[in-house]
Image (cartoon, helix red, strand yellow):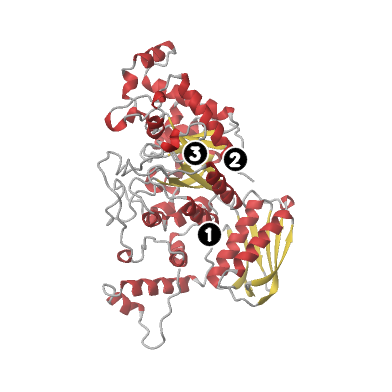
Amino acid sequence: MNHPPLSFPDITDIKVKNSGEPSLLLCIFYKKNMKRIYTSILLLCMVTMAGAQHTLLPTPTSHQNQNGSFELTGHVKIISQGEYSDKLSKDFQKEVSQSDLPKKKGKGVIVFMQSPENGMPADAYELNIGNDTIRLCASSESGLFYAKEALLQMARHQKGQLNTCRIQDSPRFRWRGFMLDESRHFFGKEKVKQYLDIMASLRLNVFHWHLTDEPGWRIEIKRYPKLTTIGATGNWHNPKAEPQFYTQEEIKEIVAYAAERHIMVVPEFDMPGHASALCRAYPEVSGGGKGRWEGFTFHPCKEETFELINNILDEIVTLFPAPYIHIGGDEVHYGNQDWYTDPEIQDFIKKNKLGNETGLEHYFIRRAADLVASKGKTMIGWDEIVDAGVSPQKAIVMWWRHDRKYQLVKALEKGYRVIMTPRLPMYGDFIQHPTHQVGRRDGVNQLENVYRFPEPIINLAQGYEQQLLGVQQSVWTERIADSKRLDYMVFPRLFAVAEAAWTTAQQKSYETFLDKLPHYLKRLQEAGIYYFNLFAPETTPEPAAPDKEDVLKNG
């Protein structure tokens, strides 16, 4: 089956004195009393060992070492060819001038070349480092950007003393995503921008932004002001928390910031379930729900419901130029109890020959797909939508239920394009070490499991490889209320996600990845980002998290 192509808009150095310098073994012996010293020296030693090889992350397709070196300084001559090359070269000059590279004037030259005539695939690039010239080449703007990011990675690690080499690189998957849930807990513009910067450096190119759900509605919709005065009130652990949301101007700012880094922002507007925040603000479109699930669903039969959804979509499409809108479509059964007893709903099922309440749910999904399509967009939904009868031309499936592999197979067999983000191992709210106590514990998403994805299930897609758009880490935030815990749950697993999304199975090596990792942990440390240190877990204690009685808090 032919499909339209996936489209996108255009840590502190540890210095040990020479006298009495402790050995690594001595540090290990005294680690109970010298945890921080031990960890720092361990990271430094591992960074030094990794220095003998390239430390690009994600690992490139081809890396050929040569004999020679190029000294990159904070003041280097740059030549660019083309409008975008001009812009990118200026960005690069600014970045290196503000780095810790030597401030002296360099002798060599760096050439930025972007031309469709190069014949490279989208996102692909070539980086040639010679003794006196560095050439960055790509056919696409994104490819040249990734070449620049690769060069920056190498310069930072090698402190400007670059080994001559030739790198040819292109991604394994088109969709290399990260999802952040800000309905349950809100993190704000600056945190999002920080994550976008890190994503860009790792060649991740999709930010899936979960902005609506039960606890709070987080996007300003001017036609419906109660969405932010009422719907944005509260979070997962405190229903009376002050309203928190993004204004439309803030949304535009973040989307533009992401686009400059070749990251597409895809919003999620949950329906027909997970609609509690909206239904609190506009109860006239609520489909009921009992107790814990009150107001969980839209009313599936009222035309007023679809008029409201249509009007909200009108504003959303002006804010997000991405060709996709995620509509959720999952877990409707949690809060559709009233559908079974409401006379209007039951009459609607009979009149339209929908069979039962599940048939009604599928009717709703089909109408949502049509509304999204009417805006010139393609709908994305969680893997429940596979059974709704939506045309594969109108929808993309996110496979999330790792225990329902048949749902992945069914989606592929029906012709859907699929993004893989199964709970195990790609959900970032699951604990990442067996000793951890806070978070979802019906599985442990350890770093190695994330890194090795999707190889354990890739055989299921045999013959359907072109329908696999890519992979994504999804971070739900019931038990993540602040930036420190968010960072801890994201890092270092996001590094593994980047390699899983970009690097071919043949080029991946978990042992080599671990050799590289200390350098990137050091960078996090320098940026003040708290992370889980898998090399010495006791040095990075698990941050606290809010708690409450909730059937969903641990999955």
Q: Identify residue type, mark 2.
A: Pro
Residue occupying the point 37% across, 20% down: 357
Q: Identify residue type, mark 1.
A: Thr
| Marking on residue 59 | 1
Residue occupying the point 44% across, 13% down: 352
Q: Is residue 36 above or below residue 3?
A: below
Write down the residue under mark 2: 321
Q: Nearer the viewer, residue 510 or 265?
A: 265
Q: Considering the numbered disc 2 on the image, is that residue within a helix, a strand or a loop?
A: loop
Front disc: 1 or 2:
2
> Which of the marked residues, 1 or 2, is nearer the chain's N terminus?
1
Q: CA distance from mark 1 to mark 3?
A: 40 Å
Residue furthest out toward the bottom? 19
| Marking on residue 220 | 3
| Marking on residue 237 | none
Q: Identify residue type, mark 3.
A: Glu
Q: CA distance from mark 1 to mark 2?
A: 30 Å
Q: Quadrant of residue 373?
A: top right
Q: Quadrant of residue 432?
A: bottom left
Residue furthest out toward the left? 549
Q: Considering the numbered disc 1 on the image, is that residue within a helix, a strand or a loop?
A: loop
Q: CA distance from mark 3 to mark 2?
A: 17 Å
Q: Position of residue 478 (x, y in %)?
A: 34, 45
* Residue 379 seen in the figure: yes
Q: Is residue 313 left or right of residue 552?
A: right
Front disc: 3 or 2:
3
Q: Position of residue 78 (x, y in %)?
A: 70, 66
Q: Nearer the viewer, residue 148 or 345?
A: 345
* Residue 65 seen in the figure: no
Q: Is residue 364 left or right of residue 555?
A: right
Circles 1 and 3, Cβ within 8 Å, touching? The answer is: no
> Which of the marked residues, 3 or 2, is nearer the chain's N terminus?
3
